[in-house]
Image (tube, helix red, strand yellow):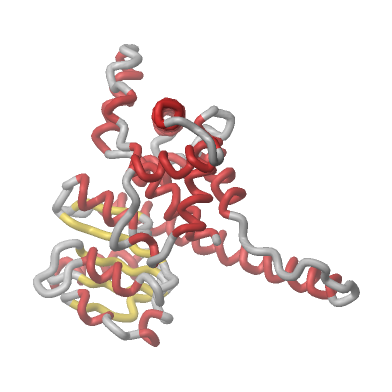
Amino acid sequence: MRFYIIDDDEVFRSMLAEIIEDNDLGEVIGEAEDGIVLNDQFSLLQQIDILFIDLLMPIQDGIETVRKIKGSFKGKIIMMSQVETKDLIGKAYSLGIEYYITKPLNRMEVLMVIQKVIERIHVQQSMEKIQESLNTVLNVGNQQKTPSFGKKESDPAEACRFLLRELGILGESGSKDLIEIINYLHQTEKSTMYEQHFPSLKEIFEKITVRKLGSSFSEDVLQKEMKAAEQRVRRAIYQSLNHLTSLGMVDFFNPKFENYASKFFDFSMVHQRMRDIEKGTGKSSTPSRINVKKFIQMLYYEVKQTL
């Protein structure tokens, strides 16, 4: 594996490079003290498998750097910082980083995170090879037939169903509303990743409810159906929190817990729910505290990455 380290602390960069090379995890092909070094460096980005990047840097911080390279960098990103602000961490995960490590670094934690990221890269590479083989077989078969409908597009609803299954809520009544929401967002998106303006919850629920009701309905019926849809979604999201928390209670390094819990929910809520379960207090973390918009945004971003 080829690593690149961006951090404004030279001692820290040396320590991290030492951990990587002493454990034969790969080669550190470069270092920099600020994220601006990667701007418009397409050829360099193609050489990096795993990018370590600090959150706070003097010229261009980690968040801005990740946002700028997102379209051209296909490797994995591990972000590091002394900052533990949940909003910044959530923003980092929403941009697609794999892990967020807090400083000062724990050597064992760094090794564990790197090994997990390498495993994911290997799995992804294996899946790509399998897909290539399947495409070859399918193309050979299709050459012997006359296509009647043209190329089938990726299905956001199917990708959403897969994620809802991973999140443990595919069978919940609110899952149908979430699938409708993802379809709506996919069909109406005008700017890349809704970076400038993500629709409000009111707008989202109003649009999918109007689609469901058709052309003839009263304002009272609209408001009633919108409220019911939001309640179903909120309950489904709360069940997802319970599902992921349960996985983390059994195994803190469970891949689903690691991958989804911090992306879809605030750290404080996950930890509080764990404490509730441990104490047997049940429902002290009420559904009303759930950030529905954050969950929908993350669900949409995750679906987008699979299309």
Please name the residue shown 58% across and 45% down the image.
162
The quadrant of the picture occupied by the C terminus is: bottom right
Where is residue 290? Give x, y as percent: 31, 32
Residue 198 vertical placement versus 168 (above, below)? below
Number of marks in the image? 0
Specify whether 9 is left or right of 182: left
Is residue 168 in view from this perspective?
no
**Foreground: 70 or 217?**
217
Q: Position of residue 157 (x, y in %)?
A: 58, 49
Q: Nearer the viewer, residue 253 or 132?
A: 132
Would residue 239 be found to the left or right of residue 81 on screen? Answer: right
Which image quarter is the N terminus in? bottom left
User: Residue 61: where, in percent of width, then height?
Assistant: 17, 68
Compared to residue 92, the image places residue 146 above or below, namely below
Residue at 50%, 54% in the rendered image: 303
State left or right for residue 33 relative to residue 291: left
The answer to which quarter of the image holds residue 287 is top left
- Residue 173 x %, y %: 54, 28
Q: Report the front residue among 131 and 229.
A: 229
Q: Nearer the viewer, residue 147 or 55?
A: 147
Residue drawn at x 51%, y 57% as measured from the top left: 187
Residue 280, visible in the rendered structure: yes
Identify the residue at image location x=90%, y=75%.
Answer: 144
Residue lying furthest right: 144
